[in-house]
Image (cartoon, grey):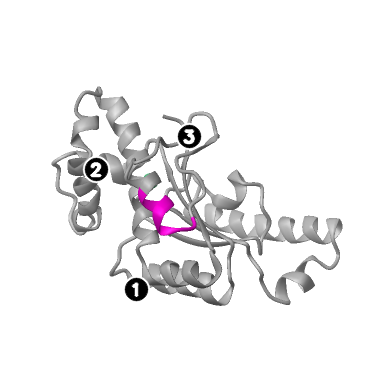
Amino acid sequence: MALIDSINQLIRNNSDWVERQEATNPDFFKQLASGQQPKFLWIGCSDSRVPPDVVTQTLPGEIFVHRNIANLVVQTDMNLLSVLQYAVEVLKVEHVIVCGHYGCGGVKTAMGNHQYGLIDNWLRQIKDTQNYYWQQLDPLDEEERFRRLVELNVIEQVYNLGKTNIVQNAWAGERRPYLHGWVFDLGTGRIKQQTSMINDEETLKEVCKFEQKVIGH
Ligand code: CO
């Protein structure tokens, strides 16, 4: 297929989608244009296989989204912090979900020693997580260790999220948002919850630093 065909296909798909939406609900785009009140902020991996709206069967307007490689919550990332602040303080989302996925290339890369350039710096903190939890990762075989590090990475990012002043202030004022750590299984399509619902400092520490058993383990 020629290069131009693949991009033109997207435009044709868009036209088909518009027609289908209008057939189902003639006011769909009028409603879409009138504003958004999403209840969820999704922080996920950029991986093309984990589209948040598809895997959760939600419509445009329902999920505010931030994605980066390996779904990291980095305290100095102005992009993420701006998305988080707007979602929590202006849109007033009820839930913030960090969703990783098994088979994550970012996590896999962080487990190895091969250099890939700029991305190595971004993935650096996954190596820190690996070191921090080495005692429980060390006995596992390579595949199991990869899967567990994907889970631990998500749990660690939920912890980072709970430590931002944005979330801390919202908790102090409104006991909101609830934080959630999820892992999407590419092999089954199912989401595995890695944390219980978290909306206070005490639970954050219990769940993310394993003072309490986590769901699924
Ligand atoms: Co990934």
Residue 89 appears in the figure: yes
Q: Is mark 2 within 8 Å of ligand 1?
A: no
Contact? badges 1 and 3 (CB < 8 Å): no
Given residues 42 and 217, the one toward you in this image is 217
**Can you identify the residue that label 1 sits on?**
78
Mark 3 crowd level (few <14, some 14–19, many ≥20, 10 Å Cα):
some
Q: CA distance from mark 2 to mark 1?
A: 24 Å
Residue 158 coordinates in the image, percent (x, y): 39, 53
Residue 167 coordinates in the image, percent (x, y): 44, 67
- At label 3, the amino acid type is Asp
Q: Residue at x 40, y 45 (%)?
A: 207
- At label 1, the amino acid type is Met
Q: Residue at x 13, y 41 (%)?
A: 113
Residue 185: mark:
3
Tell me which numbered mark, 1 or 3, is placed earlier along the sequence: 1
Determine the secondary structure under disc 1: helix
Residue 72 appears in the figure: no
The span shown in magenta is: 199-205
**Can you identify the residue that label 2 sits on?**
109
Most extreme residue toward the front is 202
Q: CA distance from mark 3 to mark 2?
A: 18 Å
**Residue 202 within the magenta-colored segment of the rendering:** yes
Tell me which numbered mark, 3 or 2, is placed earlier along the sequence: 2
Tell me which numbered mark, 2 or 1, is placed earlier along the sequence: 1
- At label 2, the amino acid type is Thr
Residue 150 coordinates in the image, percent (x, y): 35, 40
For the stretch drawn in magenta, the main secondary structure is: helix
Picture layout, residue 181 above or below residue 39: above
Q: Residue at x 36, y 67 (%)?
A: 164
Picture layout, residue 72 above or below residue 135: below
